[in-house]
Image: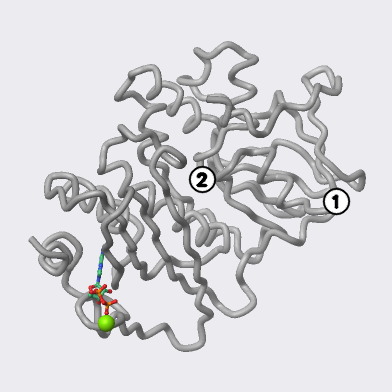
Amino acid sequence: MDEFDLIRRFFTRAPGAGVVQGPGDDAALIEPTPGRQLVATTDTLVESRHFPADLDPAAIGWRALAANLSDLAAMGAEARWCLLALTLPSADEAWLQAFSAGFFELADVAGVQLVGGDINQGPLSITVQALGEVEPGQALTRTGARVGERLCIGGVPGEAAAGLECWWRGERSGPLVERFRRPRPQLELGRALRGKASACIDISDGLLADLAHLLGQDPGARVEAAQLPVSQALHAWPPDERRALQFGGGDDYLLLFTLPHEEPLPPECHEIGVITAEPGTQLFDEHGELLPPVDPGWKHFH
Ligand code: ADP
Ligand code: MG
């Protein structure tokens, strides 16, 4: 099988909405919705750096797309199209079959079409570009959080990082492993937050690391550790380890956003703190005691 057979066999599907020309020509031809802004993003996943070398190909395909769709979600965009640049050590058909199945499974859930890409030989690395659309002036951005607003999160943080820990211990199934294998980009939540959230970011590096990106030089945030939601699966972890996973673990792809007082909290979201005039992030326990800083780079100690 040469490169073109691989593309035809694993990455070509009938063109859908807005696609004039999909894979096969020198470039894709796309017809964006008139009057909307394009939202464009790209992310690369490198073996052993962004996922374990023994992660199954279906999960690699899903995660490569998820990382990009999560960026669109954080902008409040509707996901529309994507491109896939693959560098592969070899043309392993079973690997490509599973990889493309995982990739397209999420693409179908999110309503995204693969319109083109590239295939090269070399050490495994996957780059996806995703294109979305948003009404002019409606995109969510990282800047805009104001003092006194509520800091909110779109679900339970730390589960993906805990799932990765489980994977390293040899577990291959279970709710936490699934959270790492197949994170769900919060596209619907992002769309629902348009015109409501004053700032938004997706958590890819870790709650505290991405909160710092949301805050910039100022303002700051007061985070209530006791208000962090904990799932049944996370309850089993020792409290210290759990706290480190929840504050420092990445890969959850949950939205972190700020809400003005009058806006109701969307379903399945949690209020975890408040924006403060004092810069930086301060963590407090349930007794109102200041907690020592948690290492936001915890997940990299391995
Ligand atoms: P070129 O040499 O002109 O850059 P390629 O030979 O790399 O083109 O690709 C041929 C066609 O196949 C292009 O339309 C490209 O977008 C598409 N393509 C290549 N790799 C992929 C892939 N992994 N998934 C989807 N489409 C792909
Ligand atoms: Mg060409």
Occupied quadrant, residue 167: top left
Please tell me whether residue 226 is drawn above or below residue 67 in the rendered image.
above
Q: Name which residue type carries label 1.
A: Pro
Which structural element holds mark 2? loop
Q: Position of residue 243 (x, y in %)?
A: 64, 22
Q: Residue drawn 24% across and 77% down?
A: 22
Mark earlier in primary sequence (2, 1) = 1
Please tell me whether residue 28 is drawn above or below residue 96 in the rendered image.
below
Which structural element holds mark 1? loop
| Few, some or many residues within 10 Å of mark 2 (<14, 14–19, 20+) | many
Q: How many marks?
A: 2
Ligand 2 sits in which quadrant? bottom left
Towards the viewer: 255 or 119: 119
Please give the residue where the numbered disc 1 appears in the rendered image.
219
Q: Position of residue 94 (x, y in %)?
A: 13, 45
Towards the viewer: 227 or 280: 280
Towards the viewer: 148 or 219: 219
Q: Position of residue 2 (x, y in %)?
A: 11, 64
| Few, some or many residues within 10 Å of mark 1 (<14, 14–19, 20+) | some
Please give the residue where the numbered disc 2 appears in the rendered image.
253
Q: Name which residue type carries label 2.
A: Tyr
**Residue that lies at the very extreme toward the bottom in this rendered image:** 34
Quarter occupied by the N terminus: bottom left
Residue 277 left/right relative to 301: right
